[in-house]
Amino acid sequence: MQATIAPPVVPIGKIKSFGPFGPKYEIGRPLRQLDDGDWMIEVTLVESGEKTEYRLSRLSNDPEAR
C-alpha cells in the first residue's frame, strides 16, 4: 500500500511569467505527483485563458509577473 502524500502548498492565484520575458500565467491547484517526486500544477495563461499543466520545480524558479 502506497502512502498518501499531501499536495504541496502553492500560491494559488499568483501571477508569474515563464522565465523573465515569457507569457504570464496564474497559478492554480496541484494536480498530481510525478514519479520523480515533482508535482504537476494547473496554470492558466493570462492572455488566452487556456489551462495547462506545469511542473512545480519550474514554477518555483519563474519570476513574479510585472
Image (cartoon, rainbow, N blue to C red):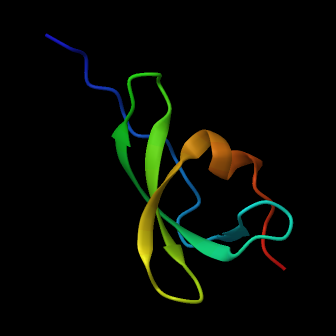
Horizontal and vertical percent position of residue 26 = 57, 73
- Please tell me which residue lies in front, 17 or 64: 17
Horizontal and vertical percent position of residue 43 = 49, 66
Left or right: 59, with 48 as reference point: right
Q: On the image, which quarter does residue 13 sit in? A: bottom right
For image coordinates 49% across by 74% down, the residue present is 44
Horizontal and vertical percent position of residue 14 = 63, 70
Q: On the image, which quarter does residue 34 sit in? A: top left
For image coordinates 47% across by 24% down, the residue present is 37
Which residue is situated farthest in the top direction here? 1
In this rendering, the answer to whether 30 lies above or below 39 is: below
Tally of numbered discs? 0
- Please tell me which residue lies in front, 18 or 29: 18
Image quarter of the N terminus? top left
Which residue is situated farthest in the left direction here? 1
For image coordinates 43% across by 65% down, the residue present is 52
Q: On the image, which quarter does residue 66 sit in? A: bottom right
In this rendering, the answer to whether 46 lies above or below 1 is: below
For image coordinates 75% across by 55% down, the residue present is 62
In this rendering, the answer to whether 2 lies above or below 38 is: above
In this rendering, the answer to whether 4 lies above or below 58 is: above
